[in-house]
Structures are given as structure tokens and as C-alpha cells.
Image (spheres, rainbow, N blue to C red):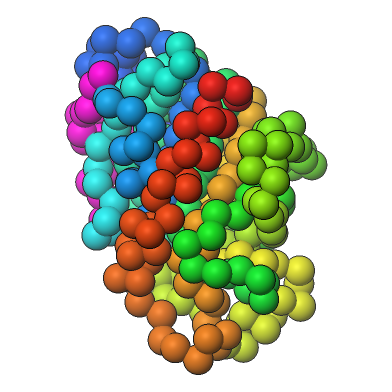
């Protein structure tokens, strides 16, 4: 980085200012980041008051995965202004950690106090079935990096808000919880790696979320993480893993997840 490049905080401020202008909404309250399979659930949340391309905001890159569209929606649910990122930049795209967490920092700069991070993932618990949403109770970050720059020793105790998890379980008592393990990807795990995850206490495996959750905590946001188990983790079912199955599980689970989001958002 040279002396004239804006800091990550400045870039987020610039993006938030452009966002306010393009959406006509000065401040947003809650941000939602969509993972694989979650789009149908958000469509069920309500009509967008504005939809813009991420590339219209400073610091955003074009989307890189089928099933993720590079759009940002603004909508109102029960008097709350919701900012929805329909795509995310993944760590495996190689654009750097700052690019991965730029939406989170933009959401904070736009006024958001809470963020809902969703993802599609592989599941390890014997009770998990494809299409099942699971609350993230904690994470293990296997990317070997952090979005935080400098000696800022951010506390990650209770990173995934106990208050919001309790709220979710009050709304849907059948919701299970699990520890989410982020691998760098983009390949899925080997069966031996899934054995390692099991031994270290993980229940969900994916390629996102942990770096965003850390950046959200640094920015003072309350974090809710919800995984959609779209497939059983490698070696569990005996079947190979593929991305089509991920999108299919999202469609099948859409109404349950849409209902869940619709009932949680007014109470955040
Ligand atoms: I969707 O089984 C989805 N994303 N690492 N492993 C990893 N990421 C995933 C998986 C999975 N399923």
C-alpha cells in the first residue's frame, strides 16, 4: 500500500456514503450477508426499495461464484432498514482479506448495529440433513489469517451473540447449534480432513464467515451466524460433493429460512 491509498476504514466510509446516495436511505440498521442457497429465503423477506450493483460502490469487486449475484438490496422489514448483500467475496478468490470484509465494514459505516452472516456449508453431526439451518455457536478459523491490521487484540468471546441465538431458538425451538470451521478452499475437504474437524470439535465446514465475523466484532456489530447445511461433509454419505446440490438445498429450504429471517429481523 502507498501513502495515497485510502485506509480500509476510509474506503468503507466512502462506500457507505455512496450507498446512502444510491439507495436514498441515510442509515441502515441491520445487514444481511447471503451465502450459497440463501437467496430464495431473502426474496421471501419482502420487496426491495432499492437494488444496486456492488461495483457501483468504492472498494467492491465483481462477484465470482454461480448462485451469488453482485447486488445489494435495501428493504424495510417492520420499520427496520435492512441492507442485504446478495454476494460475498470469498477468501479463496485471492483478492485479499480486506476485500473479504469490506461489506462488513461498509455495513458498520452505514449505521448497522447488527449483522446476520449466512452461508451454505457441509455438516458433520449425524442428525444434520441437507436443507437444515443451524445456528453458529462459535468458530474455528483455519485460514491462518485475520482481517485486523496492527496490534488490536480483539476479544472473540461470545462472538456469535448469545442473545440473538436465544431469540432464534425461541422463534424456532428445533434449531440446532454448531461450531463452524472455515477452510481456505476452494476445494472441499478430504474425508481425512473431516475426521480432523470432528476431532477438533467442529460441526459445520465452509469457506466463509469467520473472517467477516471477526471484522464485525472489531467494528462493534452484534453478530448472528446461520449456516444452511447443504450437503453432508466429505466421506459421510459416500457421495461426491457438487455445487448444484448446494443450490438445490437452498431452494428446498427457502420457505423455512425465509420465515425464520422474517421473524428474527424485527426482534434484532
Ligand atoms: I455449500 O462441504 C458448502 N460449502 N469447505 N465444505 C466446505 N465448504 C462447503 C461445503 C463443504 N459445502
Say which residue appears at 53% left-offset and 50% top-offset. Answer: 209
Left/right placement of residue 79 relative to residue 17 reads right
Question: Visible in this render: residue 18?
Answer: no
Q: From the viewer's perspective, is residue 252 above or below residue 110? A: below
Residue 29 is covered by the magenta coloring: no
Give how far across and how far down residue 35 sits, in percent: 41, 51
Left/right placement of residue 66 relative to residue 15 reads left
Give how far across and how far down residue 34 sits, in percent: 40, 45
Give how far across and how far down residue 249 sits, in percent: 39, 63
Q: Quadrant of the N terminus?
A: top left
Q: From the viewer's perspective, is residue 240 above or below residue 103? A: below
Classify residue 41 by image quadrant: top left
Classify residue 203 by image quadrant: bottom right
Looking at this view, is 182 or 59 the one in front?
182
Magenta residues, start to end:
49-64
Q: From the viewer's perspective, is residue 175 above or below residue 153? A: below
Say which residue appears at 24% left-offset and 46% top-offset. Answer: 69
Give how far across and how far down residue 14 sits, in percent: 34, 19
Say which residue appears at 60% left-offset and 54% top-offset. Answer: 134
- Give the farthest residue toward the bottom: 238
Q: Quadrant of the C terminus?
A: top right
Residue 59 is covered by the magenta coloring: yes
Left/right placement of residue 65 relative to residue 107 reads left
Question: Visible in this render: residue 66?
Answer: yes
Q: How many marks?
A: 0
- Give the farthest residue toward the right: 157
Looking at this view, is 50 or 147 the one in front?
50
Say which residue appears at 47% left-offset and 53% top-offset. Answer: 119
Left/right placement of residue 176 relative to residue 39 reads right
Amino acid at each position: 500500500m502507498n501513502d495515497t491509498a485510502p485506509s480500509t476504514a476510509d474506503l468503507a466510509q466512502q462506500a457507505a456514503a455512496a450507498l446512502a446516495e444510491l439507495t436514498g436511505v441515510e442509515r441502515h440498521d441491520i445487514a444481511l450477508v447471503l451465502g450459497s442457497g440463501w437467496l430464495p429465503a431473502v426474496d421471501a423477506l419482502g420487496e426491495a426499495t432499492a437494488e444496486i450493483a456492488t461495483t457501483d460502490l468504492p472498494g467492491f469487486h465483481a462477484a465470482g461464484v454461480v448462485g451469488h449475484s453482485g447486488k445489494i438490496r435495501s428493504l424495510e422489514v417492520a420499520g427496520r432498514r435492512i441492507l442485504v448483500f446478495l454476494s460475498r467475496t470469498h477468501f479463496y478468490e485471492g483478492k485479499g482479506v480486506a476485500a473479504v470484509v469490506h461489506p462488513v465494514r461498509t455495513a458498520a459505516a452505514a449505521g448497522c448495529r447488527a449483522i446476520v452472516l449466512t452461508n451454505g456449508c457441509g455438516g458433520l453431526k449425524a442428525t444434520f440433513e441437507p436443507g437444515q439451518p443451524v445456528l453458529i455457536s462459535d468458530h474455528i478459523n483455519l485460514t491462518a489469517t485475520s482481517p485486523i491490521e496492527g496490534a488490536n487484540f480483539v476479544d472473540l468471546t461470545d462472538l456469535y451473540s448469545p442473545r440473538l441465538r436465544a431469540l432464534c431458538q425461541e422463534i424456532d425451538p428445533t434449531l440446532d447449534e454448531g461450531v463452524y470451521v472455515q477452510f481456505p478452499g476452494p476445494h472441499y475437504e478430504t474425508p481425512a480432513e473431516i475426521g480432523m474437524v470432528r476431532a477438533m470439535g467442529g460441526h459445520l465446514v465452509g469457506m466463509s464467515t469467520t473472517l467477516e465475523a471477526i471484522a464485525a466484532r472489531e467494528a462493534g456489530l452484534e453478530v448472528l451466524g446461520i449456516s444452511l447445511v447443504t450437503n453432508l461433509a466429505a466421506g459421510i454419505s459416500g457421495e461426491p460433493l457438487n455445487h448444484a446440490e448446494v443450490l438445490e438445498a437452498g431452494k428446498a429450504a427457502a420457505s423455512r429460512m425465509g420465515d425464520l429471517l422474517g421473524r428474527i429481523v424485527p426482534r434484532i
